[in-house]
Image (cartoon, helix red, strand yellow):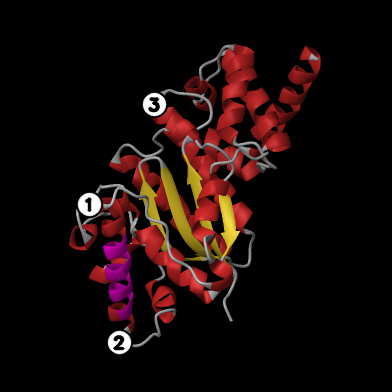
Amino acid sequence: MLGQYYHVISRGIERREIFSQDEDYADFLERLEAWLKRCGGKCLAWCLMPNHFHFLLLRGERPLSELMHHVMTGYAVKYNLRRNRCGHLFQNRYKAILCCSEDYFLEAAPYIHLNPLRAGLVKDLRDLENYPWCGHRALVTGEPDGILCASGLLEHYGGGEAALARYIAAMEVKAAELEREKAAGRRHIPQFTGETKDLVEDILRKAEKVEERPLRPRAELLAEASRLTGVACGDILRPSHIRAAAKARAIYCYLCREQAGANGQELMDELEIKQSGISKLIAKGRELLAGNN
């Protein structure tokens, strides 16, 4: 019986880069590793690309939405701080499609790991072993990356000593299909059978659509607080006794609690303020915004 596996996709707003330096990739993966442990989830395939990412995740005890919200929001805030920018980083809320069959799983895993080859970032499967931001490397080299559950993935290839060879053989078949399509000047479309036909393509089409956010990203709320007060995003997050910055921090805290679902501990960690200080800021932010209405 296939567990609750999800093919998770998100991309940068207007297809812009979300990873441009090794520090970016490492920051995102560190957050993902931490929240996988907290939520009890497992990752059976993954790949980070300059302007998007793919994961094949087994949901843990806590909701997938909780994991992805914390990883993406925390990353976006730090990414913006490193570049002194504000506003959206991701195009929309991540897309998560349930893997409804084993056939789907066995198509999606190679599809995810072949992304660097598909984009021309590596020249062949051997070169893919050197791409550091993809689960294929850890699986083939045997060097854990902190993200991939290698044993979990190999169970879907029969388990045992021959499982890795079966996975590599499947990757070789998919890579050959990809190269033939590229040589013919056509976009590679994964081949499905039965009820799973065209599902990966359907995922990619759906991932392009803008969806309403149940929770607003904290990076977006940081930008809003900056717009309302005229205080730079970086100055809002830095400890300061300047009145304008304190006002902006109060508005940011209130917006995060009300519209991003952030709790006091998260805001304490982000702003390096004690619990009593966060409570006062939230109350002050509510008062300030009420006065503007």
The residue that label 2 is drawn on is: 161
Question: Distance of mark 3 from mark 2, alpha carbons?
Answer: 46 Å
Say what amino acid the circle numbered 3 marks: Arg
Residue 49, how many percent across, how many down?
36, 46
Q: In this orientation, does residue 147 appear?
A: no
The residue that label 3 is drawn on is: 83
Label for residue 215? Answer: none
Whether 291 is drawn above or below 164: the answer is above
Would you call the spot at circle 3 few (<14 residues within 10 Å), some (14-19), or many (20 or more)? few
Whether 128 is drawn above or below 187: the answer is below
Residue toward you, 191 or 170: 191
Q: In this orientation, does residue 76 appear?
A: yes
Kindly report the secondary structure that dominates the magenta region of the rendered protein: helix
Whether 268 is drawn above or below 204: the answer is above
The residue that label 1 is drawn on is: 122
Question: Distance of mark 2 from mark 1, alpha carbons?
Answer: 28 Å
Residue 111, how many percent across, how many down?
40, 61
Disc 3 is placed on an element classified as: helix
Q: Earlier in the sequence, mark 3 or mark 2?
A: 3
Disc 1 is placed on an element classified as: loop
Would you call the spot at circle 1 few (<14 residues within 10 Å), some (14-19), or many (20 or more)? some
Disc 2 is placed on an element classified as: loop
Q: Which of marks 3 and 2 is in front?
A: 2
